[in-house]
Image: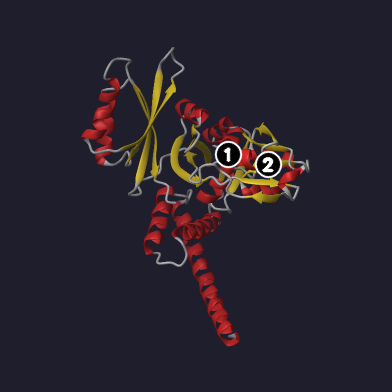
Amino acid sequence: MTDKLSTTRRQIDALDGRLVKLLSARGRLAQRIGRLKRGTIYRPEREAQILRRVAALNRGPLSSAALARVLTEIMSACRSLEDHMTVAYLGPAGTFSQEAVLKHFGGLTAQQPCGSIDEVFRQVETGAVGYGVVPVENSTEGAIGRTLDLLLATPVRVCGEVMLPVHQCVMAKASRRGDIRRVYSHTQSLAQCQQWLARHLPHAERVAVVSNAEAARLAAKDRRAAAVGAKTAAGLYGLKVLARNIEDEPRNTTRFLVLGERDAGPSGKDKTSLIVSTRNVPGAMQRMLTPLAANGVSMTRLESRPARTGLWEYVFYVDIEGHARDARVAKALEEMRGYVTFLKVLGSYPLAVT
């Protein structure tokens, strides 16, 4: 047994040595690309294609999701050699927004936590950061209204999306749930965990705060308090995780948008986001959508929002499959302009890979 174990370990060591050489070679190639392009080497469409190709090649035992995380970190490390970009997100550190940044950009990308969604948009619009990441909708709680409003009001572009499974944890200084008298969390997280909290902490007061990270900070100061949020916050604030995956809906997922100054190029599997407004007359909505069906373009999302230009006037947020440069999508959008009073293409970007 010892000989077999030693042999296996030597094989792993040999593979690690080869990996180091291959990763160094990849880093040098990334540096060469940076010199040739003389600009940012981050291209969301290219990175999406790489992740999809690796998933197609994968035969296990590692899952495609695990390989995607590894490759994202490799791409992050290679980018950091040449491209010192910063990504803004809704902070503070330890929130699901930061987890979305890490999932999409990797851990070696500089991060800038912001106090509000407005500030993330402002940082991107002014060029203070290269990119921003903001939540846009949750599978159980619905759309994030402020993000939708700012997509309409600002010139920033949507150049990517992140689908983040939201797994809530209970964390505290105490070791036993019975010691907990208060539970801090963001309003949305409290709503997503109502059933578990009612069963396991029925007598604890629920206190809504501005973020899950703030909840963890408060819980770290009070041994009779707990916080609900991402497990990363427990490590940041020295808390014990008392329970994991307490969300009422196990498939609970938050969709985030990546904001930048330009669209992503076509990747082969893309999505385009629009804002449209129609005349307030019978059949206007049907006429607006007819060009999509006529050109074989699938609509994946339709969300209404008050336009704030008049009483009972609305704009519609629409997601469709395909890139704005695709012939059928371009034709559908051109035809749609004839049926609407306003149309803004927010951006085309790769479908979230994992």
Residue at image position (44%, 38%) is: 158
Query: Which residue is most to the bottom?
Result: 3
User: Label 1 is placed on what type of residue?
Assistant: Gln
- SS for dot 2: strand
Q: Nearer the viewer, residue 140 or 181?
A: 181
**Residue on which disc 1 sits:** 195
Query: Which residue is most to the left?
Result: 294
Residue at image position (41%, 40%) is: 263
Q: Position of residue 9 (x, y in %)?
A: 57, 79
For the N terminus, give its image quadrant. Answer: bottom right
| Left or right of residue 46: residue 78 | right
When the figure is inspected, residue 23 is found, relative to residue 100, above or below; the finding is below
User: Label 2 is placed on what type of residue?
Assistant: Ala
Q: For mark 2, does the 10 Å Cα neighbourhood hold few (<14), some (14 to 19), or many (20 or more) residues?
A: many
First in sequence: mark 1 or mark 2?
Answer: 1
Q: Position of residue 253 (x, y in %)?
A: 49, 43
- SS for dot 1: helix
Q: Indicate which disc residue 227 carries.
A: 2
